[in-house]
Image (cartoon, rainbow, N blue to C red):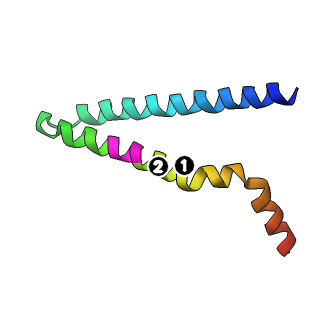
Amino acid sequence: MEAVQSSVDMVWVMLGAMLVFFMHAGFAMVETGFTRSKNTLNILMKNLITVSLGSILYFIIGFRRARFARVFHTRCAERQ
């Protein structure tokens, strides 16, 4: 049963991640529509860099914190 719950959790996280990437694409299109055509490439590159840096920082910092959240909370509880 735990394997099924873990699989469902993983599918939910992946679905959420896909929705976030589609949201970034939508915001890029909206932002591009509000600027002049000569600035389109600059806006799209800014959005690409934002997504790239966010992904890298998540895998460096966020994943570790999310994966070992129980260890972090246990250590904080022991200090009190």
Q: Secondary structure at mark 1?
A: helix
Q: How far across and how far down the image is residue 22, in percent?
A: 44, 28
Residue at 86%, 70% (x, y): give it.
Answer: 78
The residue singled out by tag 2 in the image is: 56
Q: Would you say residue 7 sits in the magenta stretch? A: no
Q: Is residue 41 left or right of residue 26?
A: left
Which corner quadrant holds the C terminus? bottom right
Q: Is residue 2 left or right of residue 14?
A: right
Residue sticking out furthest to the bottom: 79
Read off the magenta span. 48-52
On screen, residue 16 above or below 66: above
Q: Which disc, if any, is residue 76?
A: none
Q: Would you say residue 51 sits in the magenta stretch? A: yes
Tell me the crowding category of disc 2: few under 14, some 14 to 19, or many 20 or more residues within 10 angstroms, Cα based.
few
Circles 1 and 2: CB distance less than 8 Å?
yes
Residue at 20%, 43% (x, y): give it.
Answer: 42
The residue singled out by tag 1 in the image is: 59
On screen, residue 49 above or below 72: above
Q: Is residue 34 left or right of residue 79?
A: left
Tell me the crowding category of disc 1: few under 14, some 14 to 19, or many 20 or more residues within 10 angstroms, Cα based.
few
Q: Of helix, strand and loop, which mostly describes the magenta segment?
A: helix
Quarter of the image holding residue 68?
Answer: bottom right
Work out whether residue 34 or residue 24 is closer to the camera in this orientation and state it: 24
Residue at 47%, 49% (x, y): give it.
Answer: 56
